[in-house]
Each structure stands twice: as C-alpha cells, then as structure tokens.
Image (cartoon, rainbow, N blue to C red):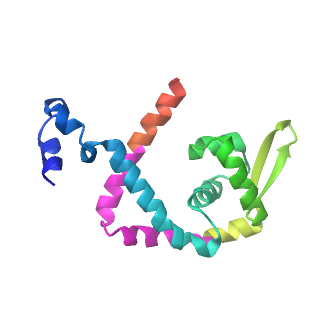
Amino acid sequence: MAVEKKLTEKALDAVGEDELLKLDNQLCFSLYVCSKEVIKRYKPLLEPYGLTYTGYITMMALWEKDNVNVKELGSRLFLDSGTLTPLLKKLEAQGYVERSRDPRDERNIIIRLTNKGRELKSMAVCVPRQMIEGLDIGNMKAVVLMKTLHQLMDAFAEDEANA
C-alpha cells in the first residue's frame, strides 16, 4: 500500500496533515479492525466450550493464577467490575468457577476454578495454535507482533499506575 510506504519511509512529523488524517494511517483504526476480526475468529474455536472471547481470557488468567479477588482479576484482564461480574456469573453457571466472599474482608469476592474449570484447560490447549495457524502470518511475525503489543500494553498499565 502506497500510504503505508510513505509512513514507514518518513518520520511521522514529516508527513503532511492530509496523510495523517487518512483512516489507513490511524493506529487506532488498525488495532480496532484487527481486534474485532481476531475476536470473531475465536468464536468458532470457543463455541465447543461455551465460552465467549472474554470468558476465554478470564479462564486463561485463572489457569495462570487461581483463587483471586475480582479486583485483581479485573486488573489483570483490563476489565472493569461492571463487565467482569456478569461474565463471572455466567462462568459460575457453567460450572467453571465458583465465587465466594473473602472471610477476611466480606466486601471482596474470591474467584476459584472448579474441577470442571481446571479440566477445561487441557481441552482448550489447542485453541492458541489453531488461532495462530488460522491467521496465516507465520510464527515469527506473530511473535514480533505480540512483543510489540505487549510493549504497548505495558505502557498503558504504567500510565494507569501513574494516574
């Protein structure tokens, strides 16, 4: 794409205003489209487990660290409690997690995997490979892309911590 070439060959501040305001030159637009399309591609991979994409990332976070409060889980997932609470209720209804009050502080809700939730991990282990293979960008490009996105996420987390 010619526009892409202009942006990669020139410093951003040397690009004209008309070029800067083109939709294809917007980082936000590229991230939005890719995010939407990647999540759409997860749908058929997750349907056999009764999971949405947000349910899937919640389960992955719990497989990494179980027995956490809602605030910690939300922080890990960049989700607010208004989004997370209904999701956790659904996962609980499916038998994947259980929610209980923290005996040390009744205001906190603790989330724990059930046996069914732990067993789901061994069934869902194929999903990441299927997803990468379905994107058809190659392993190295996928790794570079993930590292770049993690740098961006780290910057957002740092901004949030400093706010």
Tell me the quarter of the picture where residue 142 sits: bottom left
The spot of residue 46 in percent (x, y) is: 57, 70
Can you say which quadrant of the picture contains the N terminus?
A: bottom left
Circle count: 0
Determine the main secondary structure of the stretch shown in magenta: helix
Residue 113 seen in the figure: no
Percent of width and height locating residue 163? 53, 23
The residue located at (59%, 61%) in the rendering is 56
Q: Which one is in front, 11 or 127?
A: 11
* Residue 97 location (% of width, % of height): 75, 59
Residue drawn 46% across the image and 35% down it: 156
Q: Nearer the viewer, residue 45 or 86?
A: 86
Residue at 54% in and 28% down: 161
Question: Residue at the spot x=71%, y=44% of the render?
Answer: 70
- Relative to residue 106, is residue 69 drawn left or right? left
Instruction: Please say whether residue 149 is one of the residues in the magenta stretch.
Output: yes
> Toward which corner of the image does residue 15 lie, by quadrant?
top left
Q: Position of residue 27 (x, y in %)?
A: 32, 43
Q: Is residue 16 above or below residue 151?
A: above
Q: Nearer the viewer, residue 23 or 30?
A: 23
**59 over 129 or under it: above or below:** above
Tell me where the magenta segment starts and ends, as one range: 122-150
Q: Is 90 covered by the magenta stretch?
A: no
